[in-house]
């Protein structure tokens, strides 16, 4: 009892109005409506947490798979030719505090043929020794695949879906057709080179697994008639700073280079996901707002039911502000309990979504 003497009576009455109210049928009904409002707030908060968690997880999973093939930042020579002084450029790029890896590359469009099957592919010439610094393709499950690309061997590492569409396996020959052809008296003849499939990779992203072919950067330079790598791929400590780092590097390198970050390469996809996330947040927030309006209606009914109690408090000298505080405490109790229960439910479902979804699908 001594404990309650030090607590404002508004808190005590507000808590009693929240948990009690079953003495009469009317009070019992108000208590039921208060419980329903609490459940509505809890379910709204839980739905908000679950849906946004799933959306964020989906975006992160796709982004990580995409960045396993696409670098954080790419630096090109502005004229499309080979980089004049590659060691000096690598040194300047690695001097930036956010850059943790750099690797030269060549990229070009070509045609890959196997018998009657022909596919348009994006050919990327890489340095197998430096590629692990900027790519996740050399992980434990695919260790050694890129190391099979040796200069002069003219081998290709194909995406798994691309190899499946062409019907080739490791060791099979394929023909690479370059658009930069040879000028002859009969016209321009495309350059063709028979190569061997050195292996396959899987990034988990169909767009790249079905259209990307990797070869050694020296072989790519000979195939596409370049004097060396046409650009450098970079990996950053924090991928979310790619736009700021790209702007800094562009100012430092000048107009003779073109700098592009990963947000520019996949701008349409990420913009669509962001719009969807915002719309889902607005819709789910409206659900919480509806539950809050139910809470307001519950408080109005409680005030109407407690007119006699309010009159007694007035007689005892309670001010209107103090009486209002009683019902504010009651509403806050319902809101806080509902929010905390929704938070607990949302986190519980979000952390166990991998087991709950298959169970619901089987059901």
Image: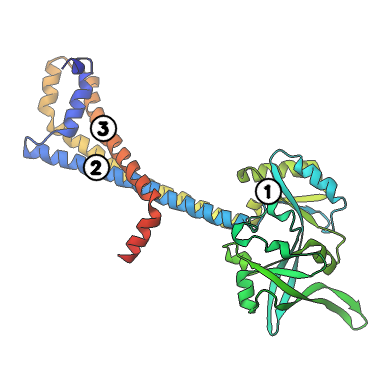
Element type at marker 1? Answer: strand
Residue at the (26%, 32%) spot, across then down: 333
In this rendering, the label closer to the viewer, 3 or 2: 3
Q: On the rendered structure, is 256 left or right of 215?
A: right
Q: On the rendered structure, is 240 left or right of 97?
A: left
Element type at marker 2? Answer: helix
Mark 3 sits on what residue?
A: 333
Element type at marker 3? Answer: helix
Mark 1 sits on what residue?
A: 235
- Using the rendered image of the protein, determine whether residue 3 is visible from the camera's viewpoint: yes
Location of residue 56 with respect to 10 vertically, above or below? below
In this rendering, the label closer to the viewer, 3 or 1: 1
Q: Where does residue 177 sit, x and y in percent of width and height?
A: 77, 75
Q: Quadrant of residue 213?
A: bottom right
Q: Residues within 10 Å of mark 2 (few under 14, many from 20)?
A: many
Residue at the (76%, 58%) spot, across then down: 127
Q: Residues within 10 Å of mark 1 (few under 14, many from 20)?
A: many
Residue at the (12%, 16%) spot, across then down: 315
Q: Where does residue 53 sit, x and y in percent of width and height?
A: 44, 49
In this rendering, the label closer to the viewer, 1 or 2: 1
In front of the other: 332 or 198: 198
Mark 2 sits on what residue?
A: 37
Q: In which quadrant of the rendered image does the N terminus lie? A: top left
Q: Where does residue 10 sit, x and y in percent of width and height?
A: 22, 22
Location of residue 113 with respect to 198 vertically, above or below? below
Q: Earlier in the sequence, mark 3 or mark 1?
A: 1
- Using the rendered image of the protein, determine whether residue 323 is visible from the camera's viewpoint: no
Disc sitting over residue 265 in the figure: none
Real-space Cα distance between discs 3 and 2?
11 Å
């Amino acid at each position: 009892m001594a404990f309650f003497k030090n607590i404002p009576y508004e808190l005590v009455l507000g808590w009693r109005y929240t948990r009690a109210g079953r003495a009469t049928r009317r009070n019992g009904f108000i208590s039921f409506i208060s419980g329903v409002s609490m459940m509505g707030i809890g379910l709204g908060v839980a739905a908000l947490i679950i849906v946004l968690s799933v959306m964020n997880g989906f975006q992160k999973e796709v982004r990580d798979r995409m960045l396993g093939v696409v670098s954080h930042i790419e630096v090109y020579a502005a004229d499309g030719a080979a980089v004049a002084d590659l060691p000096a450029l690598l040194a300047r790029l690695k001097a930036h505090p956010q850059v943790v890896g750099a690797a030269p590359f060549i990229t070009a469009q070509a045609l890959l043929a196997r018998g009657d099957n022909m596919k348009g592919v994006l050919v990327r010439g890489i340095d197998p020794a430096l590629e692990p610094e900027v790519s996740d393709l050399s992980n434990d499950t695919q260790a050694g695949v890129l190391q099979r690309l040796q200069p002069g061997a003219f081998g290709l590492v194909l995406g798994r879906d691309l190899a499946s569409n062409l019907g080739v396996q490791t060791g099979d020959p394929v023909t690479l057709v370059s658009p930069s052809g040879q000028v002859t008296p009969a016209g321009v003849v495309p350059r063709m080179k028979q190569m061997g499939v050195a292996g396959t990779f899987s990034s988990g992203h169909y767009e790249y697994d079905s259209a990307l072919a990797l070869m050694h950067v020296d072989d790519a330079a000979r195939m596409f008639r370049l004097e060396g790598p046409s650009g450098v791929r970079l990996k950053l400590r924090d991928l979310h700073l790619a736009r700021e780092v790209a702007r800094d590097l562009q100012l430092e390198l000048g107009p003779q280079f073109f700098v592009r970050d990963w947000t520019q390469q996949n701008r349409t996809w990420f913009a669509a996901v962001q719009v969807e996330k915002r719309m889902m947040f607005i819709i789910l927030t409206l659900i919480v707002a509806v539950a809050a309006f139910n809470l307001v209606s519950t408080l109005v009914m409680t005030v109407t039911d407690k007119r006699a109690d309010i009159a007694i408090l007035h007689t005892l000298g309670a001010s209107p502000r103090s009486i209002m505080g009683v019902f504010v405490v009651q509403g806050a109790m319902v809101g806080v309990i509902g929010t905390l229960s929704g938070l607990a439910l949302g986190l519980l479902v979000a952390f166990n979504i991998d087991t709950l979804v298959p169970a619901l699908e089987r059901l």
